[in-house]
Image (tube, rainbow, N blue to C red):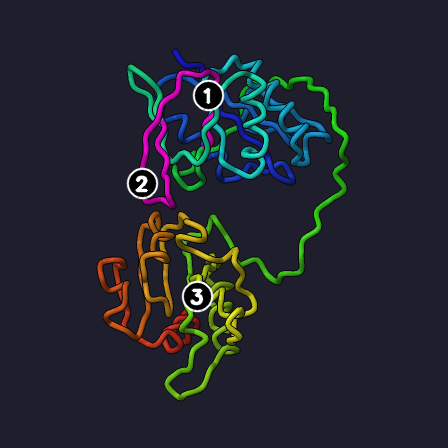
Amino acid sequence: MEKILVLVHTDEGGVLPRAALETVAAARSLTGDFTIGVFGEKAGASIGSLAVEGEAFSAPRYATDAAACEAIVRKAGATLVLAPNTFRMARCLPGVAARLNGAVDTHAVAVSHDTEAVTVTRWFYRQRMEGTLAREARPWFILIEPGAYEAAEASLAAAVEVLPVEATTRTTHVGYVSPESGEQTIRPDARLLFVAGAGWTKKQADGAVHTDEAGELILGFVRTAQSSLGSSKSLVDLSGEGQTVLPFLTHLHQVGQTGSTPRHRKGLATCCHGEEPHVVGWRFINERRAVNLDPNCGWARGKADVLYVADAFEVMRELNRLI
């Protein structure tokens, strides 16, 4: 019988990330009871029955995070540890698994438990191949990919045991410094993903390029709809070709085979051709719509639920007016 532990962390301000609640939902899909362990700022006032808190554990740092995770896993006596695949967990849990002579697997999109074994499902080769695996090594750390499960309801634990963990580190957390990259346009938790293609920077029907207006239309929609913004590789790489670009787009916005694979409920592609390297990034988008002047583009070949054959400038002007 597996002893299951859900291991999560709090973010700045003691807030649980959505990925943590999704991991709780993954644990509920398994048979048997499970324990929740939380570390970080205000962890003792969270959903876990085991907690490690204190100023030293508030900031993400390998030494302190690994010490907190190791203490919680040892206290729980867990053989199966489910954790969200956040940057913080992905950095420290492999080291914790090595300390406990266990194993770790990342980017899991499903976990199941039958009478024989626990199995994990994940994608390989840029989400083109799906594989299922099992391990005999214990404890087994499984990092659940954000967006793979619907978030569970959060409720405070009836009783919390705060574990005394000594924080030994040679580093000091001073604070966060962010580059001046403008407003936030990448929102992993947004319901809608808006993707801009290279057509926005090309000559329009009047023979002129309208990059400034394109930027206003795109950012206006993203702000109002609170959607996440993405782009195709061709649009991001235009600057290297000496062409006009949208300055707020970076390689971090890139969606596709050489970019990210987001998990939003809906996706709207504009001025994109829907070719395979780009569309592979839409594999987990539930509803796909596209706007393109070409009725024979890749989106029309079974890759979009709805294709609007129209001028994206006109469509977005009207859409911004309506919302």
List the residue tagged with mark 2: 129
Residue type, label 3: Ser
How many C-alpha atoms fall within 10 Å of the one at disc 2: few (<14), some, or many (≥20)?
Answer: few
Q: Is residue 45 or residue 106 the one in the foreground?
A: 106
List the residue tagged with mark 1: 140
From mark 1 to mark 2, how far is it between C-alphas? 23 Å
Instruction: Pinpoint residue 11: horizontal percent, then vertical percent.
Output: 61, 38
Q: Quadrant of the N terminus?
A: top left
Direction from residue 302 to residue 272 in the image, left or right = right
User: Element under label 2?
Assistant: strand
Asked if disc 3 and disc 1 are in contact, CB closer than 8 Å, the reply is no
Q: Is residue 10 or residue 106 the one in the foreground?
A: 106
User: Element under label 1?
Assistant: strand
Check residue 138 for magenta coloring: yes
Instruction: Pinpoint residue 85: horizontal percent, then vertical percent.
Output: 49, 36
Which residue is painted at 44% across and 61% down in the image? 233
Q: Earlier in the sequence, mark 2 or mark 3?
A: 2
User: What is the total number of numbered labels drawn onto the structure image?
Assistant: 3
How many C-alpha atoms fall within 10 Å of the one at disc 1: few (<14), some, or many (≥20)?
Answer: many
Which residue is painted at 70% across and 47% down in the image? 176
